[in-house]
Image: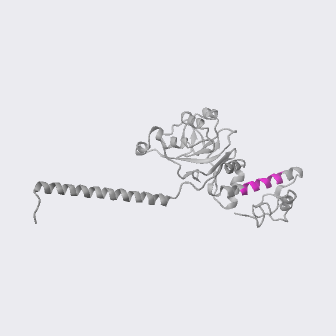
């Protein structure tokens, strides 16, 4: 066999090596793409469902207690964010969750986080409007999630509310901004020394409560409740039915004072038609035919 001149042989060898490296790199990229796709599937979707504006308004018309009761009746985990209290007595909120996750500060995290206006927190801000509540997961209750300069943008966005298990600073200014704010407390601390915003619209844990983007978030003077989007309509139906009955019971006890034990508490889906409560409800036109609160009428 004839062998090419040494110079030509060297060039061909180099080209062969280059082609092999290119093929290996392409295969690696292909595998990475597959791995990312597989990992995305393994993680599952961040959002659990869609909530219409109409249903959102209905949920906002109910108290947080009624919503907690509705989820409890269905056997779902506690959904009250215990670490979030209203910054002002007038604050109430309802909206779809836009989530932001903070992680503990570390030099490489600060370096790798998109800078300036590309930061995950500002991405989250721009997703918010009147029907959204920004939910921030802090690394600790006393760490600052932000103050007047950052949150001026939330005022400009006319946000439906801000909820966090962390603390806020510049309290007076935030109250003056006018949007509902629920936080663990207030602080003078700076946030970046302790934590960095890392992900927008992922699944987060706030005071041990899971929040998915698009979940309904309702806040009042008793706290903040997260209603999973997947079951929001069912929760509303149960909670609304309970509130109607509680109003009837309260009205009856005002008219005829006495211990509430004759009618209350009651278990949704377990009210007996011939019980004192069942008979009282019948006088108000509430029966198993039009309510899911009676024995045998539960639809969950």
Queried whether the magenta region covers residue 241, the answer comes back as yes
Residue at the image point whose x is 31% and y is 56% from the top: 25
* The C terminus, quarter of image: bottom right
Residue 180, by quadrant, is: top right
* The N terminus, quarter of image: bottom left
Residue 36, by quadrant, is: bottom left
Queried whether the magenta region covers residue 272, the answer comes back as no
Residue 81 shows up from this direction = no
Find residue 18 and report its horizontal and vertical position in percent: 24, 55
Find residue 171 and report its horizontal and vertical position in percent: 60, 35
Find residue 281 and report its horizontal and vertical position in percent: 84, 58
Residue 152 shows up from this direction = yes
Residue at the image point whose x is 83% and y is 51% from the top: 250
User: What segment carries the magenta color?
Assistant: 237-250
Q: Quick check: 175 above or below 75?
A: above
As drawn, the residue found furthest toward the right would be 256
Residue at the image point whose x is 55% and y is 43% from the top: 127
Q: Quick check: 110 above or below 34?
A: above
Q: In this orientation, which residue lies closer to the viewer: 218 or 41?
A: 41
């Amino acid at each position: 066999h004839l062998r090419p001149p040494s110079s030509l042989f060297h060039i061909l060898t180099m080209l062969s090596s280059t082609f092999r490296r290119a093929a290996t790199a392409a295969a690696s990229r292909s595998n990475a793409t597959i791995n990312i796709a597989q990992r995305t599937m393994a993680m599952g979707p961040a959002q659990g469902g869609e909530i219409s504006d109409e249903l959102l308004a209905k949920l906002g018309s109910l108290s947080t207690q009624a919503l907690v009761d509705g989820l409890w009746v269905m056997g779902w985990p506690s959904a009250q964010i215990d670490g979030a209290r209203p910054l002002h007595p007038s604050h109430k909120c309802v909206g779809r969750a836009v989530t932001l996750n903070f992680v503990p500060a570390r030099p490489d995290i600060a370096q790798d986080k998109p800078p300036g206006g590309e930061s995950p927190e500002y991405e989250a801000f721009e997703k918010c409007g009147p029907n959204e509540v920004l939910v921030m997961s802090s690394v600790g209750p006393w760490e600052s999630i932000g103050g007047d300069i950052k949150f001026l943008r939330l005022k400009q966005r006319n946000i439906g509310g801000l909820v966090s298990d962390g603390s806020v600073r510049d309290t007076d200014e935030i109250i003056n901004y006018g949007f509902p704010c629920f936080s663990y407390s207030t602080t003078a601390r700076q946030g970046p020394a302790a934590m960095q915003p890392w992900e927008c619209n992922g699944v987060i844990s706030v005071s041990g409560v899971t929040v998915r983007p698009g979940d309904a978030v309702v806040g009042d003077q008793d706290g903040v409740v997260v209603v999973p989007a997947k079951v929001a309509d069912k929760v509303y139906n149960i909670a609304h039915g309970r509130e109607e009955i509680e109003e009837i019971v309260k009205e009856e006890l005002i008219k005829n004072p006495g211990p509430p034990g004759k009618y209350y508490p009651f278990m949704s889906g377990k009210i007996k038609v011939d019980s004192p409560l069942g008979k009282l409800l019948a006088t108000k036109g509430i029966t198993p035919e039009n309510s899911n609160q009676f024995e045998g009428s539960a639809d969950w």
